[in-house]
Structures are given as structure tokens and as C-alpha cells.
Amino acid sequence: MTRSKMREHIFKVLFRAPFYERNELDEQIRLYFEEYHDVSESDYEYMEKKILNIADNLEEIDNKINEVSVGWPVDRLGKAELSIIRLAVYEMLYDDDIPVNVAINEAVELAKVYGSDDSTSSFVNGVLAKLV
């Protein structure tokens, strides 16, 4: 599975995460991936680890987002946009395997597909660019 496709699955799980308690996240990840029989064990482990790491660092990630998205704190952002930005910020700050420009580009591409309108990708790009 490509990294882009894995990133899309991670985004979808992150989008669902606020609807559950943190202690339910392991089960929610498992339930989500039960629908996808073509996911290899190594891909599943990679995605699960990244999702759990994002959840574990959520406070710091959200603080970084709040520092740069003036007028748009995390509690005002759309859930899709917030999930996309959280994933990208995690990759930019904690994932040495992902170059910053790749994290931003992938986030913009996700925003084009899952964002609420045409300006979403520009907003996501602008927020992430301020972190660089």
C-alpha cells in the first residue's frame, strides 16, 4: 500500500477519534480496518502506531496549531481540516521519515478531497507553512 493511501486511512481514523474516549482508540482502529482485507500486517502496524502516537501527542500538536492559525483555534476548525492538519503537524514534528514538504503536500491533497470547500486546501497549506 502506498504511503498516500496509508495517510488517507490514518486521516479517516483521526476524523472518527473525537467521537470516542482515548481508551477506546485501539478498538476503533481495529474496527475500522476490519473493513479492509487487503491491508498487510506491516501496513496495519505502521498506521496503528502513527495514529496512537498522534493521540499521545495531541495536546502538543494542538498547541502548535493554535500558535500559527490566528483566529482559528482548533475548537473552531472543521473536523476534516483539523484531522488533516493534526496528521501533517505530527509528521512535521515527530516523523523523521517524512520530509516536511511531503507532509505539507500530502495534507493539501487530502484537503482537496475531504475539505469543506475549495479554500480548504489553501488554508491547510497556509497553516502548515507557518510552522516551517
Image (tube, rainbow, N blue to C red):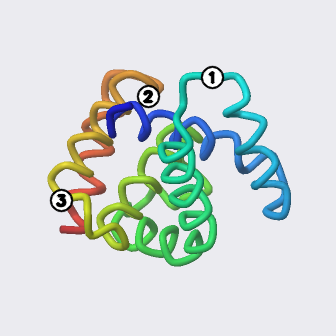
Secondary structure beneath dot 3 equals: loop
* Mark sitting on residue 77: none
| Callout 1 amino acid | His
Whichever of labels 1 and 3 marks the residue nearer the N terminus, that label is 1
Query: Callout 2: 10 Å neighbours few (<14), some, many (20+)?
Result: many
Identify the amino acid type marked 3. Pro
Counting from the top left corner in percent of width and height, residue 95 is at 34, 67
Q: 107 or 24, which is in the foreground?
A: 24
Residue positioned most to the front: 41
Q: Residue 101 versus residue 66: which sits nearer the camera?
A: 101
Instruction: Name the residue beneath numbered marker 1.
Output: 37
Compared with residue 123, is residue 132 higher up or lower down, i.e. above or below?
below
Quarter containing the C terminus: bottom left
Q: Residue at x 41, y 73 (%)?
A: 64
Q: What residue type is labelled 2?
A: Gly
Tell which circle, 2 or 3, labels the residue nearer the N-terminal end: 3
- Under circle 2, the secondary element is loop
Which numbered marker is on residue 99?
3
Q: Is mark 1 on a helix, strand or loop?
A: loop
Residue at image location 33% in from the left, 25% down from the top = 112
Checking the image for residue 115, the label placed there is 2
Q: Mark 2, mark 3: which one is toward the viewer?
A: 3
Write down the quadrant of residue 119 in the picture: top left
Residue at horizontal 49%, vertical 53%? 46
The Cα atoms of the two marked residues, 1 and 3, are separated by: 29 Å
Disc 2 and disc 1 in contact, CB within 8 angstroms: no
Q: In which quarter of the image is residue 65?
A: bottom left
- Callout 1 environment at 10 Å: few (<14), some (14 to 19), or many (20+)? few
* Distance CA(mark 2)–CA(mark 1): 27 Å
